[in-house]
Image (cartoon, rainbow, N blue to C red):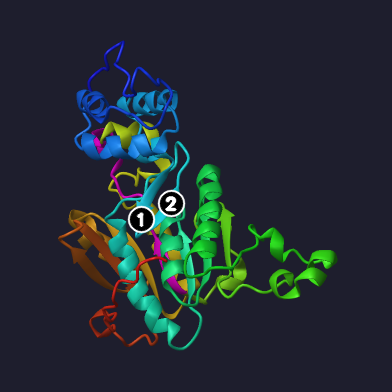
Amino acid sequence: MSSMPSSPSSPYSPSSPDSPDSPDRSAVVDRLRAAGCVFAEDEAELLIAAAPTATALDALIGRRAAGEPLEHVLGWAEFRGLRITLEPGVFVPRRRTEFLVRQALALGHQAEEDRTPVVVDLCCGSGAVGAALAVALERVELHAADVDPVAVRCARRNLAAALRNGRGSGTYGPYEVPETYAPGDTYEALKAPEAYAPRPPHKPYAVYEGDLYAPLPATLRGRVDILAANVPYVPTDEVALLPSEAREHEPRTALDGGADGLDVLRRVAAEAAQWLAPGGCLLVETSERQAAEAVEVMRAGGLGVRVKRSEELYATVVIGARLRSPDRSPETMPEPEAVPERPAE
């Protein structure tokens, strides 16, 4: 990004310097373009919509021009039709990760036919993957975990919002109990018992803080149907080659996958079979050139493996399954049925 002019022109009309109704979009676009923003026009619209005043807009543009990710400046990212809340310093969910969600949903819908699927979103970051799965599945028991306390705070907020406002409307988890459902409020309950009586969630969820499997309850061992782990996979020597937005504003732990980019995957795959239910699957995103080695890592963990690719999203997902019987090979693993996209409500 190039440096910004020291005295940029205001994008609002001089006659109403703090009015949100008269921004000069061209001035905003010019500032963003001068700062090196490739999609300056689109970003200008988003920033103008987010700013209540000229002063606020100037501050947002300044942050973006300084190299902060647009999603951090706005405070949210769109992911599969959901608005995912982000705080500065939290990993920004990528659109290519929607391909991992699609693969997980295909498997989840199959499991749904017989029971409520148990889903774990490991290395959950902002909770985007878990939120998308919870909204799209009619029934689910969702658990999410991350080592970053700021990410965990975002994930709790995003899961609460997704389940309350999306397909899981009215559901709640242990960290977000709507006040209207608080037990013991007898006066309110007497006034409107049908609205205020406590009720159990049909999509229970929980978010834990800790390293990989460590914070998960032991009761999940052998029960997980879908283990989505968006592990870091950038080799250490290549982190410096990432765009500055990622290098400088996203946590290193969410990017750096060790010498060959597969260190965290090795740790996840080594224990996955202990947590997966028979037939349960571990899904991870990786680069195309790492896929072959990622397959071997999962096989070393005792999983049957297949690879799925999306040219449209430039995404590669490796799926490892805990085989139902030891004599089955990866080639006999059932392919997930294609499922139609179900937009969030």
* Residue for badge 1: 79
Pick whichever of labels 2 and 1 is earlier in the sequence: 1
- Which mark is on residue 277? none
The image quadrant that residue 160 belongs to is: bottom right
Q: What count of labels does the image hold?
A: 2
Q: Amino acid at mark 2?
A: Ile
The N terminus is located in which quarter? top left
* Residue for badge 2: 84
Which residues lie in the magenta part?
225-242
Q: Give the residue drawn at x 19%, y 63%.
A: 310
Q: Position of residue 92 (x, y in %)?
A: 37, 45
Disc 1 crowd rating (10 Å Cα; few below 14, some 14-19, many 20+) is: some
Disc 2 crowd rating (10 Å Cα; few below 14, some 14-19, many 20+) is: many
The Cα atoms of the two marked residues, 2 and 1, are separated by: 7 Å
Look at the numbered discs 2 and 1 and tell me whether their residues touch, using CB distance below 8 Å.
yes
Q: Amino acid at mark 1?
A: Phe
Relative to 104, 209 lies left or right? right
The C terminus is located in which quarter? bottom left
